[in-house]
Amino acid sequence: MRIQKPGKVTEQIWFLGRKESGVYLLEGNHGSMIISGGMSYIVSDLLQQFKDFDIDENRIKKLLILHSHFDHVGTVPFFKQRHPEIEIYASERGWEILQMDKAILTINAFSRNVAKRMKKEDVYSTYDIDWTKDVSGKTIREGDCIDLGGLEVSVLEIPGHSSCCIAAYVPKLKALFPTDGGGIPFDETIITSGNSNFTKYQQSLKRLKNFEVDYYCADHYGYVQGEEAGEFISKSIEMAEKNRARMEAAYRSTRDIDAAAQKLISSFYEENPSYFLSPEIFLDVYRQMVRHIAMVIEGKA
């Protein structure tokens, strides 16, 4: 069962933000942790939801970045300024990327692009939410565990969607937070996005299949619970295989990365016109994916 409405997922987990861009709040005995940073423009939604759901914002002690893409770090600068004591966690590679001038320019430009697409650009006149180099924090690695008091969060490195991608798993609640390293539950389908390396993305999906999951907590388009949650990674693996076959066919028919990406993106938006990313941004994603597929086909990977 797929749920996109913000609210309580289960005891100790809240889904907050908006359906196309959400974050999760884990409530432990020693404090709370936000998982993922979401889009910058959801700041106003989060503040209202703290009030509506009677969430004590001052209990938030930690924030876990699952990967460094613009649509998953947007609220981090705001919370770091509002609560300087909050500990920010990301992978080693994640922090490297988040200090790069080019990455920071992309984060801020793409964030404003999507805010405009979602008619939420007015948030920039209210809050200071641009990413800056002074945002820093702690490094988290494969096998690390974050203890919130009665609630432990395990970390798994899952490269492929991005080189810095990690997943979080809460054994006590059988809750998996795969960010875009898993499948995205959009409408009635699953979006698979192995941006940096589709082969590694597929390998990471297979690693995630080993977890027992009652709550599949995606960053985009809400969470999945019940029987579908337990099957979601398996279904994502199947969809990734189909998506790879489509990309292979598109490249073989054109032998041109840009032409294949254009063909694929046109087909995608014909089927999914309301997807939150603008076509020009998602076209870059498809170029990256097709480039990897082309290298494999040409024997250069």
Image (cartoon, rainbow, N blue to C red):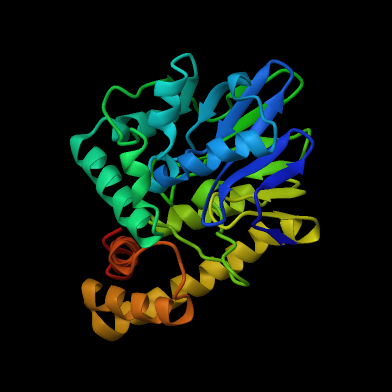
Front residue of 75 and 267: 75
Left or right relative to 17: residue 280: left
Left or right relative to 57: residue 180: left
Visible in this render: residue 167?
Answer: no
Visible in this render: residue 214?
Answer: yes
Front residue of 182 and 74: 74
| Residue 35 vertical position relative to residue 137 in the rendered view, above or below | below
| Residue 135 vertical position relative to residue 259 in the rendered view, above or below | above
| Residue 169 vertical position relative to residue 189 in the rendered view, above or below | above
Where, by quadrant of the figure, is residue 232 drawn? Answer: bottom right
Quarter holding the N terminus?
bottom right
Give the x, y percent position of residue 139. 44, 23
* Total numbered badges shown on the rendered structure: 0
The residue shown at (44%, 22%) is 82
Q: Residue furthest left?
A: 101
Give the x, y percent position of residue 301. 30, 58
